[in-house]
Amino acid sequence: MPTPRRLTTGLAALSLLATGAPVAASAESSAAAAAPSSQAGLPTTAFPLGPRAAAKQTSKAVAPGVDLFTLTHGSATDGYTVSVLMNGKDVGKRADAEAAAAACEAAGFPATIQEVIRPAVADYPEGAGYMVRLGSWSLKDRKEADKVVKQLKEVDIPAKADFLGDDGMQTTGPWQLRVLTVNPGVFRGSYHSSLGVSVAKREKTSAMAKHAKALAAVNGGFFNIHTAKELRGEPVGISVVDGTLLSEAVPGRSALILKNRTARITELSTTVTAVSADGERTVVNGVNRAAGADELILYTEQFGAKTPADDGTDAVLDATGQVLEVRPAGGAVKAGTRVLHGTGTMADWISSHTPEQWKLTVTTKVKDLRSGKSVPLTPQTSIIGGGVGLVRNGREHVTAQADGHANVNMILRRHPRTLAGVTKSGTLILAVVDGRKPGVTVGASMIEAARLMLWLGARQAINLDGGGSTAMIVNNKLVNHPSDGVERPVGDSLLIVP
């Protein structure tokens, strides 16, 4: 459960704002939540976050079997403090916190050292860190905290004004959510993923929804912000659109598999193999991403950029696998073609085993790591890679380490969230939790997100990209309030198509 604030011995004992009821839901309230449907609506039991009371909710029918709910809950009681940064971060080791607190004291700013307990999740143990904080101010007095930050900066102490509702500890909220439920027994459309105009380019969820004439959509998985600027739409992890693998899996990470009106969540791996006409076989290391040293990367016509202009070699293939051209790297991937790009030793492999007019067979396989079975890539199949698994077989099961998010910021602190879940009866639940709006809506931690999806009736649930990416589109309208103030272009989206 979210951790209460624990103050350890510091240079001064200041009273930080720490009001609010415990966040955790009781086992009874989670178990009582019925799977939502277009007839039953959402649970009316106590909301699982904040004060023990029912959330206010309104509903709207979007289409037969598709319903949109707006939920609000809680009230604003958190205010601001000032957090000192240690090596650029607000949580550090005890020794770093003691040194930072001493520096504040020497400069005439009494400080408190606060222990932060990052709770254990399914694949990562509990851990402790330390924060150095100064003062407390009400929500309307943010400017007073900013003044202290400025004064600290003048004596070379980096700090920031910190809203206490973001901590992931006790809070009264408030929360604002939009929840979309799709009952496959009534809805007659289908589910799809979209990467927009290309893999490389980011695009707004609303634009992808409009192009597909979707009833509704939410943003998809994380995209790579640590690659070249022109490639930052590339998904981090698996992406399959209409049966075509467009990005390889990070083995063991959670994903959402969509087919017609079915959705399921599992962990996946991918294998891509190239076999030359002379029988030489090799592993293809990646799909539609930047190439590393001695790698073989497959670029599809959906890539939307040129292959890397490095010292590598390209083999251009037609739809049947015939080698049309062997060329220096850095060319376009034309419609109806694929390109195998090799660097280092793999450039030599292309030169040796893919002369023009030869056939090269490229196979892609996706494996469900829960069942051990292959996932058929039919034209009706789409897959979206998630950020973190949240619920497995009806129990809280947060896989932060496997999904690359094992840290205080991602596990404990509250952020806007986009969540997807599936009930026992097959109903798809899409939820967006707005956040980063002090006094309006605080977002959710990963653990809170898992409990929210359990309350909504999910037996399996996954965290998609969040933060400023969180967006829900219904009938071509943005229905939530992104934390950036405007809708952000993203890598991919989940579409509900009539």
Image: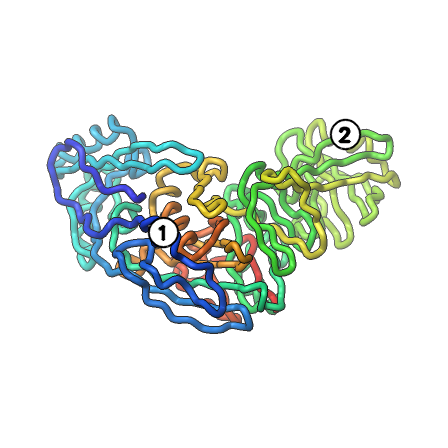
Q: Distance between the residues labelled 2 and 1?
A: 49 Å
- Which quadrant: the N terminus? top left
- Identify the residue shown where x is 19% and y is 59%: 140
Q: Position of residue 143 (x, y in %)?
A: 20, 55
**Quarter of image, res 267:** top right
Residue 429 shows in this picture: yes
The image quadrant where one finds the C terminus is bottom right
Above or below, comparing residue 332 to residue 158 in the picture: below
Disc number for residue 444: 1
Name the element at disc 2: helix
Q: Residue at x 27, y 41 (%)?
A: 3
| Image position, residue 147 (x, y; %) | 18, 50
Q: Visible in this render: residue 308?
A: no
Q: Name the residue under label 2.
A: 349
Amino acid at circle 2:
Trp
Q: Position of 362 compared to 371: left or right?
A: right
Left or right, residue 334 beside residue 234: right
Q: Is residue 107 above or below residue 58?
A: above
Q: Is residue 71 above or below residue 29?
A: below
**Front residue (pair 53, 117):** 53
Q: Which of 224 and 450 is in front in this view?
A: 450
Q: Quadrant of residue 398?
A: top left
Secondary structure found at label 1? loop
Q: In the rendering, at what x and y percent does residue 6 appear? A: 20, 38
Label whose residue precedes the other's in the sequence (2 or 1): 2
Locate residue 327, reporting x and y percent: 78, 40
Q: Nearer the viewer, residue 219 or 489?
A: 219
